[in-house]
Amino acid sequence: MSHIVNKKKKVLLAEDDQGLVTILEKVLKKNYELGLSYDGAQTLKMVREFEPDVVVLDIMMPYLDGLHICQQIRQDRGQNDRPKILLLSARATEQDRQLGIAAGADDYITKPFRIDDLLKRIDDLAKG
């Protein structure tokens, strides 16, 4: 009889708003192995080293914005659909959402958002 150990899925939170990071870190650590990044350059490095299942990525980041990070991740990974990418943005127009999806994001959520909505989206991406 084999025992299958369910490893926690890995989530990389790439966000430069420390207040938001503090809140999300508390709730995400309950169900996920969590990595944190505070700028674009660090995010790309963490994607390569941490190998997350899901990247929660703010669009407005220092050094390199989230759209460019998203494009770079997809370019580096080729046809691999991992990690899944959820973009966070204060930009709420349909055009902004379409730009995010075109950059390679799997989902897009606007700020402010409800924590339970964000968690559901992360859960769905981590499963799929």
Image (cartoon, grey):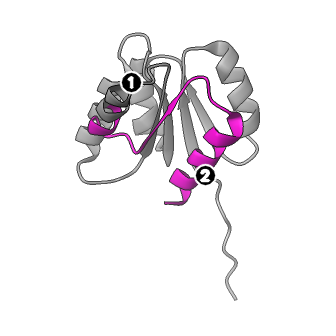
Count of marks overlaid on the render: 2
**Badge 1, how many Cα within 10 Å: few under 14, some, many 20+?**
many
Question: Relative to 6, is 98 on the left or the right?
Answer: left
Residue 44 is situated, as x and y percent measured from the top left of the image, at 38, 28
Which amino acid, by three-letter code, is at mark 2? Asp
Which amino acid, by three-letter code, is at mark 1? Gly
> In the drawing, what numbered circle is on residue 66?
1
In the image, residue 68 sits, relative to residue 34, either above or below, namely: above
Mark found first going from the N terminus, 2 or 1? 1
> In the drawing, what numbered circle is on residue 8?
none
Please tell me which residue is depicted at 27% across the width and 33% down the height of the picture: 71
Q: Which residues are magenta?
A: 100-128
Asked whether 42 falls inside the magenta stretch, the response is no
Label 2 element class: helix
Please tell me which residue is depicted at 70% across the width and 89% down the height of the picture: 1
Residue 34 is situated, as x and y percent measured from the top left of the image, at 63, 38
Q: Nearer the viewer, residue 116 or 75?
A: 116
In the image, residue 83 sits, relative to residue 112, either above or below, namely: below
Residue 109 is situated, as x and y percent measured from the top left of the image, at 51, 34
Name the residue beneath numbered marker 2.
123
Please tell me which residue is depicted at 59% across the width and 34% down the height of the picture: 35
Asked whether 120 falls inside the magenta stretch, the response is yes
- Residue that lies at the very extreme toward the front in this rendered image: 94
Q: Nearer the viewer, residue 58 or 112?
A: 112
In the image, residue 81 sits, relative to residue 108, either above or below, namely: below
**Badge 2, how many Cα within 10 Å: few under 14, some, many 20+?**
some
